Image (cartoon, rainbow, N blue to C red):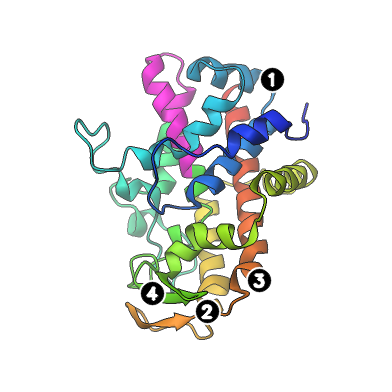
Amino acid sequence: MRHHLSAALIALSVLPTMAPTQAFAWGGDGHRTVAAIAYQLLTPTAKAQVNGLLGDDSGQAFINAATWADDIRKPQPDQPYPGSGPWHYVSIPFNDAMYVKGRDCKTDSCVVEKITAFNAQLSDSQLLEGVRRDALKFVIHFVGDIHQPLHACENGDRGANEVQVTLNGRNTNLHSVWDSGIIRGSWGNIAAHQALLTQRAEAEHAKWENGTPADWATESHTIARQVVYPSLGNVPAPGPVTPPVVLPADYAAKEAPVVDEQIVKAGVRLASLLNGDFK
């Protein structure tokens, strides 16, 4: 049974993390929104299983887990998963039409194959609980990552990290704008916006519950090619872009519908994946 996002769960999903986070896909607000949407769409069986793994029945641990994979990337003693940075994206060449494993992920160290691998660990009840718990946290995060268009496209610019832009007087890069700048510039009241996106997910979930991680990567890559890069005015030649492209003041508002839909898709598909794991 699916319910509207409760006020308590919304409050949990907008709590800041204990330490400031770097700019990664969707930022904290976006990732926690993906998780909050997914949690509301879980079946009772799946919800009981993830609650058991995380040791919490309120949903707070599930939502907090959404940023864990970014947090452990930061330099720290006893790095639990060294070298995990490439797991957050896949570099599909700009001029190619779809994800091809043999070209884009030869060593299985990309977001597409990591979703598949960690989901298999999560589904294996014979594995240690700690292994499955970490696998769940990775799946929650990576399903969010794969829906950020610039985490699935490469144009010689490090996923647009080297495409310099200016938005509302602030110098940044196109990747950062799509990670969190559009959310910051368009969502306003985070809790209210999350509630709207959850209602949309409940209404539209049937049309988004399809596909595989490879399909989702191809879809995100297409959006990068057809929407994100053209939003600069002209699709740049491969390579870094300097001096900065000045984006219009209403850029965040104009591009927000794309971000919103990708976050809704991510929440729906995360729930569908977990519901399939725990039937």
Q: Nearer the viewer, residue 38 or 71?
A: 71
* Dot 1 or dot 4, earlier in sequence: 1
User: Which residue position holds label 1?
Assistant: 44
* Dot 4 or dot 3, earlier in sequence: 4
Q: Helix, strand or loop at disc 1?
A: helix
- For image coordinates 59% across by 46% down, the residue present is 266
| Amino acid at dot 4 | Val
Label 2 CA crowd tier, 10 Å (few <14, some 14–19, many 20+):
some
User: Which residue position holds label 4?
Assistant: 163
* Dot 1 or dot 2, earlier in sequence: 1
Q: CA distance from mark 1 to mark 3?
A: 37 Å
Residue 130 in the figure: left or right of residue 7: left
- For image coordinates 49% across by 37% down, the residue present is 66
Label 4 CA crowd tier, 10 Å (few <14, some 14–19, many 20+):
many
Label 3 CA crowd tier, 10 Å (few <14, some 14–19, many 20+):
few
Q: Is residue 130 magenta?
A: yes
User: Which residue position holds label 2?
Assistant: 247
Q: CA distance from mark 1 to mark 2?
A: 45 Å
Q: Which residues are magenta?
A: 121-142
List the single residue furthest toward the left: 77
Q: CA distance from mark 4 to mark 3?
A: 19 Å
Marker disc for residue 254: 3
Q: Position of residue 169 (x, y in %)?
A: 48, 76
Q: Is residue 272 visible?
A: no
Q: Helix, strand or loop at disc 4?
A: strand
- For image coordinates 52% across by 25% down, the residue present is 61
Q: Please, is residue 11 above or below residue 45 in the view?
A: below
* Dot 4 or dot 2, earlier in sequence: 4
